[in-house]
Image (cartoon, grey):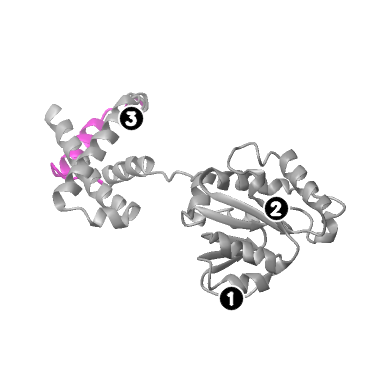
């Protein structure tokens, strides 16, 4: 009986090793293929050991009561039938249920982990370290300099992404304004929204100009990895000089260049990988 259990365990380990090899080759297609056969065996062996240790620590007696119930409900002559059926299965051969058990264990171990917002932002920005972004229509609810003469309102839906970007990027915000009062309104709105509290963005990195060409000039001087804008003309002009751009437009537009991406809003671009 003990030898049979050991043999079943060995067969299950073999099945797990094979299934893990396939699973890991799909899970890590690049790095896994660079490994030699000894490294693959070591990784698979370690994974099997971890999985079985984890499984053994869980309650092993969950299936016993159900087995006793079935035995109790079976007629007396079922013992002969069970023994005869068991003898039909050759020693050392795994049943389909063993394969299923192995797959279930490995599938549970390799459950995909949902990426954090920080990971999504980093991947979307291709690990870029400097970002420039206009305010109107992207960070602010207002869409024209004339509106800023009356009020400035930060869109609450962008705050989480904006603050995440400031954690690992050098971020500059910029906008065209018509007077000094508009500048003050924008800075107060950003401060009230908590944009400056994280330490990643300071007021000196909020830039103002009087023309659209002035904003374009800011971007070229700063040489960011990414620029985010709503003006298609500026996006087109900068396509030759900036590595990546995001054109924010509620209307779907044709892609003007390979390094220009588009999205209906700032936050929707970072909504998923």
Q: Is residue 1 above or below residue 121?
A: above
Other-residue count near label 3 (Cα within 10 Å), few / some / many at <14 / 14–19 / ≥20 = few
Q: Which residue is at a point 54% across and 49% down the rendered structure image?
A: 170
Measure how far apart labels 3 and 1 are at the Cα level. Answer: 74 Å
Q: Find the distance from the CA under tag 2 to the CA under tag 3.
A: 71 Å
Image position of 97 (left or right of 139): left
Count up the numbered dots: 3
Label 3, secondary structure: give it: loop
Whole-angstrom CA distance, mark 2 to mark 1, is: 23 Å
Q: Nearer the viewer, residue 272 or 238?
A: 238
| Region rendered in magenta | 70-95
- Which residue appears at 20% of the width and 40% of the height? 45
Residue to which mark 3 is pinned: 74
Asked if residue 248 is positioned above or below residue 67 in the image, the reply reads below
State if disc 1 and disc 3 touch (CB < 8 Å).
no
Give the numbered dot on residue 256: 1
Q: Which residue is mark 2?
A: 139
Magenta stretch encompasses residue 93 = yes
Q: Secondary structure at mark 2?
A: loop
Across and down, in percent, residue 108 comes to: 38, 41
Decide which of tag 2 and tag 1 comes sooner along the chain: 2
Answer whether labels 2 and 1 touch (C-beta < 8 Å).
no
Q: Residue at x 53, y 61 (%)?
A: 223
Give the image location of residue 102, x and y in percent: 29, 42
In the depicted view, which residue is nearer to us: 147 or 61?
147
């Amino acid at each position: 009986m003990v030898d049979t259990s050991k043999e079943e365990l060995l067969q299950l380990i073999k099945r797990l090793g094979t299934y893990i090899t396939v699973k890991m080759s799909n899970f890590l297609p690049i790095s896994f293929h660079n490994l030699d056969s000894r490294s693959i065996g070591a990784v698979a062996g370690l994974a099997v050991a971890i999985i079985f240790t984890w499984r053994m620590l869980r309650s092993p007696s969950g299936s016993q009561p159900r087995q006793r119930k079935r035995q109790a409900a079976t007629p007396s002559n079922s013992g002969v039938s069970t023994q005869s059926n068991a003898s039909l299965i050759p020693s050392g051969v795994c049943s389909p249920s063993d394969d299923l058990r192995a797959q279930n264990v490995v599938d549970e171990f390799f459950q995909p982990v949902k990426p954090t917002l920080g990971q999504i932002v980093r991947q979307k920005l291709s690990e870029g370290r400097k970002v420039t972004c206009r305010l109107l229509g992207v960070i602010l609810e207002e869409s024209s300099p004339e509106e800023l003469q009356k009020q400035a309102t930060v869109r609450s839906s962008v705050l989480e992404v904006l603050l995440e970007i400031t954690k690992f990027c050098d971020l500059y915000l910029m906008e065209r304004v018509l007077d000094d009062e508009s500048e003050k309104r924008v800075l107060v709105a950003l401060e009230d929204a908590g944009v400056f509290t994280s330490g990643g963005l300071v007021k000196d990195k909020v830039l103002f100009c009087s023309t659209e060409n002035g904003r374009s000039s800011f971007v070229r001087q700063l040489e960011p990895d990414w620029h985010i804008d709503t003006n298609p003309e500026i996006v087109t002009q900068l396509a030759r000089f900036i590595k990546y751009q995001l054109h924010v437009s509620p209307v779907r537009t044709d892609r003007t260049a390979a390094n220009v991406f588009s999205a209906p809003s700032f936050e929707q671009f970072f909504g998923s990988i």
